[in-house]
Image (cartoon, rainbow, N blue to C red):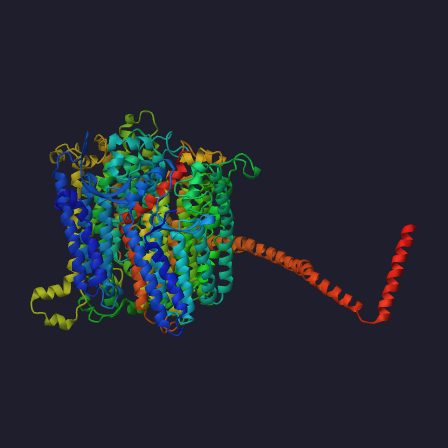
Amino acid sequence: MDVNWLDANYLAWLIPVPPLISFMLIILFTGRNKVLSHSIAVGSVVLSFLMAFGVFLKATGTDDFGFHETTLRIFGDDITWMDVGLSEFKMGVAVDPLTAVMLFMVPIAMLMIFIYSVGYMGAYPDDDPHKIRYSRFFAYLSLFAGGMLTLVVADNLLLLFMGWEIMGLCSYLLIGFLFEKKSAQQAAVKAFMTTRVADVLMLVGIGYLYAEAGTLKFHEIFFANNAEIIERLGNADQTGYIGLSAASIIGLLLVIGTIGKSAQFPLHAWLPDAMEGPTPVSAMIHAAAMVSAGVYAVIRVFPLLEAGGNPHHAEYTAPLILMGVIGSITALGAAILGVGQNDIKRVLAYSTISQLGFMVAALGIGAYVAAAFHLITHAFFKALLFMSSGAVIHAMEHGEHAAEHGHGHDEHGHDEHHTHDEHAHGHGSYTWADLNAKIEHGIEAGHLQPGERTPYGTDYVGPNGELPDDAEWKTSIPQGLKPDFVAKPNNIALMGGLRHKIPVTAYAMLAGSASLVGFPLITAGFWSKDEIIADAMTFITNSGQFEGHSPWLHMLVFFSLVIAATFTAFYTTRMWLLTFWGKPRSAMAEHATLMNHVDPEELAKAQTSTKKFWLQYSNSALMQGPLVVLAFFAIFAGFVGIHGDFPVLEWFTGSHNFFHEFVGASLLHEPATVPFKIWPVLVSVLAFSIGAGFAYVKYGVPRDSYEKDPVQNMVGDPVWQALKDRFGFDTLYLATFYRGFEWFGRVFSYRKVDKETIDGILETVAVVFNNIGEAIKRFNHVIIDGVGDGIPQLIGLSGRWFRNLQSGRVQQYLLFTAVMLLAIGLFFVLRVL
Amino acid sequence: METQFSGILTGILAFPFVAAIIILFIDKEQKEVIRTIAAFATGASLILAALVFFTYDTEAARTANAGLIDSGSGLLTFQFVDKVTWIKELGVSYQLGVDGLAAPMVLLTGLASFAGVMISWGIEDRVREFMAFFLLLVAGVYGVFLSTDIFLLLFFYELAIFPMYFLIAGWGWVELREYASMKLTLYILIGSVIALVGILVLYFEAGSFFTENPDLLPATSESAYSFDFNHIQYAAQQGAFDDPQYLGLGKEVTVATFWFPFIFLGFAVLAGIFPFHNWSPDGHVAAPTAVSMIHAGVLMKLGALTAIRLGVQLLPDGARVHLPWIIFLALVNVVYGAFIAFRQRDFKYVIGFSSVSHMGLVSLGVATMNTTGMTGAGLQMFSHGVMTALFFACVGMVYDRAHTRDIPSLGGFIKKMPLVAIAFIIGGLVSMGMPGLSGFVAEFPIFVGVWRGIPELIWNNENHPEWATSLTSGGANYYGLIGIAAALGIILTAAYVLRVVGQVFFGEFDEEKFPDIPPIRIQDRVAIYMLTAWLIVLGVYPKLMSDMIESAVQPVVGLLTGSK
């Protein structure tokens, strides 16, 4: 076959390949060489980035790219993969406008994450598990990247699902990367199982779609014969169950997949715990890949979700309602929870959940382009925020180390290589590394008091300080991390003043935070969030379009999101101020730094100043460099999607919303832009101002020590504790689902049904058969054997008896003859009578 | 009767059989010689099986079976046929052949048996007897997959069961082996005896039918009474089993509808169908490693394939009536087995119950009665066979070294046995249906097939359950809801796999408890590599096998949907 691999049609095949090859190379061959391994990984992503960027440029340079009127102009190719009766199943790749913008965002974010990882992982001491499994980390990260890119270029739901599942697996491996740490293992299992529940339902939906449509290719389903398939599936009279059309049922199942993958309520509980993985993983999961994939998938299949309805006229279909309601609840609930978190990564985790809720809610009201737009801008600023938080945590860990060893200044703090284990013991704090030791051995040694709360919960310490029955403890999956546990280096209450210690990180994070809260006009987040709110607000500003239908979902989405945006502004400002503003509130923060652990002798040996600089600052540069790049996008990526009629900026936009026009062509009927109104902009600005302003009032005051959180003072202790406990969802799920399944599996299925009923029946049958057998045995013995043995016995008996007759004694013969004659005589006499 | 003989299939059958006999004449202390002979015999069969698999002509099969595929009438064409008359008076012949369903199964048997011998290299106790029984078992299994004469098939079916009894009772886990071997043998024998009665009824019904209508006799048959598979299948097509009022049981009851459940379930006992599954986990646990591999990997497929061949293919009329409720049994299998596996403490019981769950998916696929679902069932049979053989191999290796299978007592074995851990994890990913591995390409078509459940088959027959109608609208059916319910089993699979992986292979390794963990043998490595490779290859490129299986289930679906 003559294939020009540089052609955009085939190039799409190659985009996911380099990271996948990188995964295999590192796992199979280069695991021992750390530098080579990370070079391969970074190199592979660079390759993917170049190819993806090439495809992106080709796509943007193609006139009428996407679906215009009757022409379908996209890139793609496929091969036959499997025969299963319906039709040949073809696997292929396709690039349409939506894919193209993803191909712009995903590789850039990934490349930055990879470069950052080199610095982040490199900054650990040599005997730390991060460093010991350094190469494996890059292998998993590569596989993760490969999975995401596969998902993006997939031209059908099944290939998309494959990438989706590869990422699920990688998230399991990476969240549980420090597998000695039980909380990490639990978090990994929790993440995998929660998303798995949703994934399997999604797979069922995909199966239904394939069964009904006979194909899973997006463009065949959505466009072929003027969307004939969509038309048929959307008709509840022809297809489906219980009054819902097939498209609705499929849509519901696919949306459930997204609820799991994008951590929407009620399947959100795994995501805050996913922070157990190394921070680059968090960035990967939260920004570039996994959770974005969930939203991407529903955007991808949007025509199916709205089949049979029209959200712009408030004709909502079941999947749209599900998305609108779930998205609203999630956006608002997670934003509220974000207020009560003191773990810097957990604040960001809830902000991710909340922002994904924005996108899902936006899709629920049909704001297709706005959701896609927010997906892109969110990925940039959230990757930035997470990586910044990783830098902060690193700096705090170094500070903790330095403070503990009593060195006056951070520059001298790292002459000895201590593991985190050691200094954790010194503090008596619950940093992860000594947890197992404490749980397993520490109780006898008196480190833990009876009933004392460990990060595993109090359950593990009995009234006399003993562990529960060892076997029982190990067989049941232990309780997850207590929801309100915060590791010291992550605790924003202990930070403060870090802008003087790590200024690049501080201002990069400021840019990211500004984008997240939607700082008006100059941040990407503002433009994308504004577009969602504008779309939701049409029920006020352009109510004529609903033609008499009640736009209740629009209202719900609008009010939830505006309140959520206010909370977002509040907690994000709170987080940034607590971290960087004021003065250091702990010794850790006092000594925080991102400089390397350098042996002073080695430093003295370094000849040139460049070499000296690199020895001291290599990790710092590798970590903070990507932050600067992403900060650029966090600010400027929004300008491609400004409403065409935005006042003053018209000179820039030329009355075109570039993003809308480009991505809108991914749909058969390009979605109409909402006419520009000033109200949504004012609402956005107001939400930002109230939230951020209030936070500044409360937290902007420099404080030397940290006693009680101002929010705690405002809302009272019980509410504050509820926030820290994440409204108790984690505990509830453990108590219901896990224990319930466990009970069902162990007690019901195995003991009651299998052992007692089925085996019971069997045993009853066995007993009955035994008794029957016994009866038959006796029958056999008595009757059959009686008969069988009786006949010969009788013969023998009679033989013996008759033998007695022939005794040879004449007197006896005579006697017999006399008796016989008498008897015969008697017989005849009686007969005559 | 014309005699055909290509010899390849006879070769597959003969190698283990002859080797078993040769081994009996070798001095019992010559253990290495005995093992080598066994390895050679199973290896040779494996090579021939691979030859059959790779040279099977799918297109020719489609062409030859066009009649069956299109209208459900005609004779089924097998390939690589060996055919010799055996007992002419009864219509019994020695007749071997493969179709697209049997060819992957033959390959599976080759893989599992060769891997089984490799894994058993460490057995020191009565090696001669063990290997002889093992080879006899393998020969029996091959025989069932290859026979196209029903008499021969049943002969091999029983031949495969009885060495199981001795292998488990003689070399199994001391605490359970007598109970388990007896339980297993009784369950399977009772199932097969019930089915056998049904088969004999078909034999006599077909015989009397052809005696009355000699002009309908198929060209391949010499007399009215024959055990030839095609002979009886043809009789079914001609309506030999359609007379209503069978045994005076009402106008709906025919030979086909009366006997189908007995024949299908009788064989499905061996596929572990609920509620006749309980022999299987006990049997798996009690059996020595290699026997568990054959048992779960191959023997259960033997039940499934025979149930399809002698149940669905011979009595499509019965299948149409009964599969719509048998699908509920399959559903129970899937979910129920997974639940139990989730709560087992014994490592081997987890895998044992996972087999129950996964074989439920096979039954589910068959019960869809469409090409997609049945192709999925075929793929699942192969995929599960390889996967579970790998599982039991891994469990066996851990058990041999740790001397315990109690999950909470184990931990951290990835540090000592990395290859085994990785193999187990790959197997686990297959079992939870991770895309890119063979489990996914099997489960996905099954779920699609469930959604596609053909309403015409399920609804346009008077016996469908009334209550189900109310659940559905627009001509759809309750099959889709079963698909959603069965998804729970897949979710639970992930749960128990992660649990086992986490507790056995991850976590801390206890040096004091397990001071001496010898490295795994080269033979073990061979087995692991060989099995794992298939899981990955099939997952990445399923067309390798899906095409072939599809060509074999099309005639079955043709029979089910055919002219009637």
**Does residue A819 appear left or right of residue B126 in this picture?**
right
Q: Nearer the viewer, residue B19 or A348?
A: B19
| Residue found 60% across the figure and 58% down from its top | A770
| Residue found 42% across the figure and 40% down from its top | B234
Corner quadrant of residue A345: bottom left
Where does residue A585 sit, x and y in percent of width and height? 26, 60
Corner quadrant of residue A816: bottom right
Give the vertical position of A214 relative to A748 (above or below): above
Residue B91 visible in this rendered orientation of the protein: yes
Which residue is outermost to the left? Answer: A608
Q: Nearer the viewer, residue A542 or A519?
A: A542
Q: How many marks?
A: 0
Q: Quadrant of the N terminus of chain A?
A: top left
Q: Nearer the viewer, residue A157 or A557?
A: A157
| Residue found 19% across the figure and 56% down from its top | A22
Residue A698 visible in this rendered orientation of the protein: no
Which residue is outermost to the right? Answer: A833
Where does residue B30 sit, x and y in percent of width and height? 37, 73
Q: Nearer the viewer, residue B26 or A37?
A: B26
**Does residue B275 appear left or right of residue B290 in this picture?**
right
Where does residue A752 sit, x and y in percent of width and height? 52, 54
Give the vertical position of A240 relative to B95 (above or below): above
Where does residue A32 sit, x and y in percent of width and height? 21, 66
